[in-house]
């Protein structure tokens, strides 16, 4: 499967879509290669992300409990 990309800006005028730059075709394999080349989270980064999400959950839960009590 191929996808169209624009090396400029997409614009919509009079109900039609146009590219202000050059149209480029990208294959699904090229997209998969780009996605797979991206680095994954390390264990340390995953831990920091989990800690931040847990802190956010605790803060929101605490706020809701205090709101209900007052």
Image: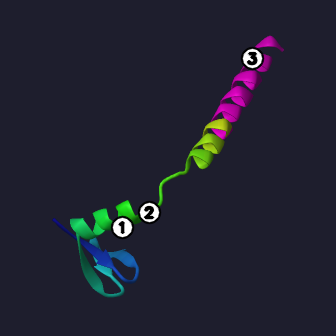
> Within the magenta stretch, is there residue 41?
no
The image quadrant where one finds the N terminus is: bottom left
Instruction: Please rate how many residues cluster around mark 2, counting C-alpha atoms within 10 Å: few if below 14, some from 14 to 19, many from 20.
Output: few
Residue in the foreground of this view, choosing between 11 and 8: 8
Farthest residue in the front direction?
A: 43
Q: CA distance from mark 2 to mark 3?
A: 41 Å
Instruction: Please rate how many residues cluster around mark 1, counting C-alpha atoms within 10 Å: few if below 14, some from 14 to 19, many from 20.
Output: few
Q: Quadrant of residue 65?
A: top right
Q: Do the residues under discs 2 and 1 have CB atoms within 8 angstroms?
A: yes
Q: Do the residues under discs 1 and 3 have CB atoms within 8 angstroms?
A: no
Q: Secondary structure at mark 2?
A: loop
On residue 34, the disc is: 1
Query: Residue 32 location, x and y as percent?
Result: 29, 62
Above or below, 54 relative to 27:
above
Above or below, 64 relative to 36:
above
Q: Secondary structure at mark 3?
A: helix
Q: Which residue is mark 2?
A: 38
Farthest residue in the right direction?
A: 70
Q: Which residue is mark 3?
A: 65
Query: Residue 23 location, x and y as percent?
Result: 27, 83
Q: Main secondary structure of the magenta part?
A: helix
- Of callouts 1 and 3, the N-terminal one: 1
- Magenta part of the chain: 52-70
Query: Residue 24 location, x and y as percent?
Result: 26, 81
Q: CA distance from mark 1 to mark 3?
A: 45 Å
Labels 2, 3: front one: 2
Farthest residue in the left direction?
A: 1
């Amino acid at each position: 499967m191929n996808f169209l990309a624009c090396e400029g800006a997409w614009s919509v005028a009079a109900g039609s879509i146009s590219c202000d730059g050059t149209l480029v075709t990208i294959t699904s394999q090229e997209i998969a290669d780009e996605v797979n080349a991206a680095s994954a989270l390390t264990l340390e980064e995953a831990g920091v992300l989990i800690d931040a999400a847990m802190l956010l959950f605790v803060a929101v839960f605490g706020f809701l409990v205090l709101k209900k009590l007052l």
